Image (cartoon, rainbow, N blue to C red):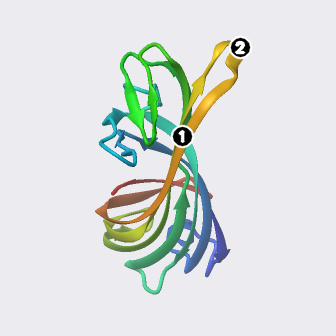
Amino acid sequence: MACPLAAQDTSPRARLYDRLQVSGSLTTIILNTNIRVDPANGTGTDIDAEDDLGLDRSKFEPRFAVRWRPGRRHEIEVGYQFARRSSTRVLDRDITFGDSTYQLGATVNSNLNTDEASLIYRFAFHTRPRREIGFSLGLGALFLDAGLDAVGSGGSVQFSQSQKLTGPIGSAGLYGRFLSGERWYWGAEAR
């Protein structure tokens, strides 16, 4: 869903092609994460976040964006996508995460946040009054925050290990937007 800041007219076409938009949306993110945090001496365990830690493979998360359209086919967007997961799981193997080793059978609380800030350029190669389809190129930053807590009897945390990292990312993909009624549109993007 999008909320236009400046509209040239009130026709349905104006909703897809406003010059400036601020939008908030609820997106489905599909995740498949492998992570390894090495200790000071040695090598950490390659961890499949979904299989080993029980984190969700897909999740609904909020996304916020500001879009500016310098021309009918061109668009520049600054956005922020949230991607935050947590779970509690009994381990079925030993895991070394940073300077801590979590033993087989241990109960662990895990969290993995992989939020993304992005700057995206889009070019619409197909434009019609009620739809547009195009490609996108993006640059951004991935904010990784991973942590594991060993949980003892009674639910108290015995020891904890966490790691934060910010890294650059790039993306390329396709997108489409389709007007639905007079006030709403839906969109899909794969980058």
Q: Say what secondary structure mark 2 lies in.
A: helix
The one nearer the camera, 5 or 108, is 108
Q: Are marks 2 and 1 in contact (CB under 8 Å)?
A: no
Which residue is the site of mark 1? 161
Which percent across, then down, holds residue 180? 52, 52
Vertical placement of residue 45 versus 16, above or below: above
Residue at 36%, 19% in the rendered image? 93
Number of other residues with Cα within 10 Å of mark 2, as a class: few under 14, some 14 to 19, many 20 or more: few
| Res 15 → quadrant | bottom right
The one nearer the camera, 28 or 71, is 28
The one nearer the camera, 92 or 167, is 92
Q: Say what secondary structure mark 1 lies in.
A: strand
Q: Is residue 180 left or right of residue 57?
A: right
* Image quarter hosting the C terminus: bottom left
Which percent across, then down, holds residue 158? 63, 26
Vertical placement of residue 92 versus 25, above or below: above
Which residue is the site of mark 2? 154
- In the rendered image, the residue lying farthest to the front is 41
Q: Is residue 85 left or right of residue 121?
A: right
The answer to whether one can see residue 144 in this image is no
Residue type at the position of mark 2: Gly
